[in-house]
């Protein structure tokens, strides 16, 4: 046992006796000296700042030199004494030593101010707090191009969120507006452009940034440098803008700095006092950009569970959510998934590729299991290895599960997705001619699908929400999965005939998932807008499927019957230039015959798909050289001449041939 001795001692610096326990007079003496040093330092720096401000005002008033933007100092000085031009701000900021923060900590006092610094340039951006970089991005390539936004806590100065919006490409500014609107008022928000951030910055997004107090956002043009420190809402702190001198050059690097007076304490929401509240507090005190989940007045629920689904074949089927460091995507995905009828949160596991606090915190907020994987290799190889470990670990964790459902963090799911898989799981178990059940139709755009009860058999593996059979993975795929030396896309590998072995996947006419992610290894906002944004997502529930029709022999019989009876469109018309190529009817069934020189000749189909605004990057969604979809609410069959269904082509009909355009 340790005893602390209390003694009465006579202290030279005092005429009285004091009781000395944990801290002696020497400690108090040191503290007093440090406080004295701090006071002198503060006084010296205040005088220094005042003197420099006077000199800058005088020199600026007598000079015609353009410093950043020819700013009127009387209009742009703020209460922290920070000027918007990087050249002015940098000099003033240097007069406040970083050692002040250290001194405050040593004497046990709370630091009431922080110095925030932000840089914008062609090659890098960063945010520093009291001289320490809390955010930096110098990554080469388009993935880090655009407007970087960093959110700091106004009480602690700690970083709460960071996002990159590639406003060089369309639609990214809409995502930026959404993120900014979700931020709580009072947060410190820092904006910086890296490389280029103005090309697709529409008036609506510029107006949103104006609401944060920006004075230069309307002037930002091609390859300009721009950094802006603000507090939501409409509190300007510092801002700098350096225009690009010419179209083939970038604006000079710019650094802005501001002193920010920290708030005394964070606002406390009266959410009550239970485990759910503590979970919410833990999350909302650390992360930003999640809207109503952190609302004081009407917080969104976080204990989510869908309604029970009677007679479900999915109760014991684990759900794996493939994720990386896209926490806002994961948040949106889980909120939808966990409210879906038939989903038990205890059967859901989020598998994260890497060690990232925020996506893990999102999963824990909703009380969903989370597993983090050590990254192996890079790019598509890294994703492939992440997938393999996810599939292996899920089946190992649930040894009695015959199936697993694979979803991804950037997918919305329909309300009937579990019911959809529940009705089809028994067929996957019994029909050896099936490879998988997928929730996604590659050709299921808003204009090209119609019937949520209609199902197809296809020779490709669509992914984007699919049911995998244990026996297929454990007996075939797991052992020969591409190793860490293979930079292959896992889904392209699964589509290889050597793996598929003639088996097919079942897909719906109207998809049960919707791909909303605009960021990823092979994804950007432009690609998302062009190929995914107009996909349809089923909104109906209680749909009963005629599963028996999907058995191999039954399906063949049905296809022959439908194509034989279909009306042949006028093949003398060009489907790409004649708007009436598909008649203006409704609920009719039409067939189109296209030229094929061999079973692998898809030249006409690829060009026809482009004309019909379908998936045209590669060949997907076919069954025996036949594609099926809807146009103008009519059922359409496209039959290649190497298809067994080509026998129904009338003799006087010449198959359509659309050659590939030769670029000159």
Image (cartoon, rainbow, N blue to C red):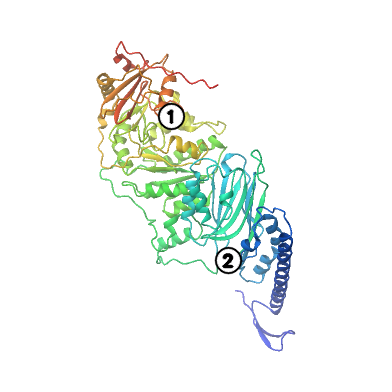
Residue 198: quarter of image = top right
- Measuring 64% from the left and 63% from the top, which residue is drawn there? 74
The quarter of the rendered structure image containing the C terminus is: top right
Furthest residue toward top: 651
Asked whether residue 247 appears in the rendered view, the answer is yes
Q: Do the residues labelled 2 and 1 touch (CB within 8 Å)?
A: no
Q: In the depicted view, which residue is nearer to us: 497 or 449?
A: 449
Q: Residues within 10 Å of mark 2 (few under 14, many from 20)?
A: some
Residue wearing tag 2: 262
The quarter of the rendered structure image containing the N terminus is: bottom right
- Measuring 65% from the left and 61% from the top, which residue is drawn there? 73
Compared with 609, 96 (above or below) is: below
Q: In the image, which disc is placed on residue 124?
A: none
Which secondary structure, mark 1?
helix
Classify residue 527 as left or right of residue 378: left
Residue wearing tag 1: 476
- Measuring 55% from the left and 69% from the top, which residue is drawn there? 264
Compared with 216, 199 (above or below) is: above
Q: x and y percent of residue 65 in the render? A: 72, 54
Classify residue 310 as left or right of residue 193: left
Classify residue 114 as left or right of residue 439: right
Question: Whole-Å distance between the Cαs marked 2 and 1?
Answer: 60 Å
Q: x and y percent of residue 165 in the render? A: 53, 46
Q: In the depicted view, which residue is nearer to us: 441 or 378?
A: 441
Residue 408: quarter of image = top left
Q: Residues within 10 Å of mark 1 (few under 14, many from 20)?
A: few
Q: In the depicted view, which residue is nearer to us: 273 or 652?
A: 652
The tag earlier along the polypeptide, 2 or 1, is 2
Q: x and y percent of residue 647 in the render? A: 30, 14
Which secondary structure, mark 2?
loop
């Amino acid at each position: 046992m340790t005893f602390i001795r209390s003694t009465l001692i006579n202290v030279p610096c005092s005429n009285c006796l004091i009781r000395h326990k944990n801290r002696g007079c020497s400690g108090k003496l040191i503290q007093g000296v440090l406080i004295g040093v701090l006071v002198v330092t503060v006084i010296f720096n205040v005088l220094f700042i005042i003197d420099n401000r006077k000199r800058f005002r005088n020199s600026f008033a007598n000079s015609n030199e353009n410093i950043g933007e020819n700013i009127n100092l009387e209009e742009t000085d703020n209460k922290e004494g920070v000027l918007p031009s990087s050249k002015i701000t940098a000099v003033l900021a240097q007069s406040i030593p970083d050692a002040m923060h250290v001194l405050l900590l040593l004497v046990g006092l709370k630091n009431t101010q922080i110095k925030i610094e932000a840089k914008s340039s062609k090659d890098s951006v960063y945010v520093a707090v009291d001289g320490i970089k809390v955010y930096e991005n110098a990554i080469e390539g388009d993935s880090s191009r655009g407007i970087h936004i960093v959110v700091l806590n106004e009480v602690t100065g700690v970083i709460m969120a960071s996002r990159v919006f590639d406003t060089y490409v369309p639609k990214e500014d809409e995502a930026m507006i959404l993120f900014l609107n979700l931020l709580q008022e009072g947060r410190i928000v820092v904006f910086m452009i890296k490389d280029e951030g103005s090309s697709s910055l529409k008036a609506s997004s510029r107006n949103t940034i104006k609401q944060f107090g920006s004075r230069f956002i309307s002037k930002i043009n091609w390859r300009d440098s721009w950094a802006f420190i603000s507090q939501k809402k409409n509190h300007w702190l510092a801002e700098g803008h350096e225009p690009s001198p010419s179209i083939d050059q970038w604006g000079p690097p710019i650094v802005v700095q501001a002193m920010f007076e920290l708030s005394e304490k964070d606002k406390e929401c009266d959410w009550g006092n239970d485990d759910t509240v503590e979970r919410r507090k833990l999350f909302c005190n650390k992360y930003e950009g999640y809207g109503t989940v952190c609302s004081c007045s009407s917080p969104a629920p976080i204990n989510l569970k869908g309604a029970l689904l009677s007679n479900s074949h999915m109760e014991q089927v684990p759900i794996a959510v493939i994720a990386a460091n896209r926490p806002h995507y994961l948040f949106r995905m889980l909120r939808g998934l966990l409210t879906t009828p038939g989903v038990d949160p205890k059967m859901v596991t989020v598998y994260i590729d890497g060690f990232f606090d925020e996506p893990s915190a999102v999963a824990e907020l909703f009380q969903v299991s989370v597993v983090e994987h050590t990254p192996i290799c890079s790019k598509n190889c890294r994703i492939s290895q992440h997938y393999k470990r996810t599939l292996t670990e899920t089946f190992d964790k649930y040894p009695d599960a015959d199936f697993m459902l694979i979803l991804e963090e950037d997918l919305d799911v329909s309300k009937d997705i579990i019911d959809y898989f529940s009705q089809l799981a028994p067929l996957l178990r019994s029909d050896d001619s099936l490879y998988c059940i997928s929730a996604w139709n590659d050709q299921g755009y808003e204009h090209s699908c119609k019937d949520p009860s209609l199902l197809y058999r296809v020779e490709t593996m669509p992914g984007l929400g699919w049911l995998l059979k244990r026996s297929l993975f454990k007996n075939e795929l797991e052992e020969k999965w591409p190793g860490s030396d293979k930079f292959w896309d896992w889904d392209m590998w699964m589509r290889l005939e050597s793996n598929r072995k003639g088996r097919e996947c079942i897909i719906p006419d109207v998809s049960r998932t919707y791909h909303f992610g605009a960021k990823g290894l092979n994804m950007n906002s432009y690609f998302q807008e062009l190929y995914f944004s107009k996909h349809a997502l089923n909104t109906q529930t209680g749909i009963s499927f005629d599963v028996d029709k999907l058995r191999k022999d039954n399906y063949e019989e049905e296809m022959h019957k439908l194509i034989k009876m279909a009306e042949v469109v006028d093949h003398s018309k060009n489907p790409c230039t004649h708007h009436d190529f598909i008649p203006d009817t409704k609920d009719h069934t039409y067939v189109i015959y296209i030229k094929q020189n061999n079973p692998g000749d898809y030249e006409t189909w690829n060009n026809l798909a482009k004309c019909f605004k379908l998936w045209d990057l590669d060949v997907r969604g076919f069954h025996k050289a036949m594609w099926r979809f809807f146009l103008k609410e009519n059922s359409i069959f496209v039959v290649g001449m190497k298809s067994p269904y080509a026998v129904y082509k009338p003799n006087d009909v010449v198959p359509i041939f659309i050659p590939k355009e030769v670029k000159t």
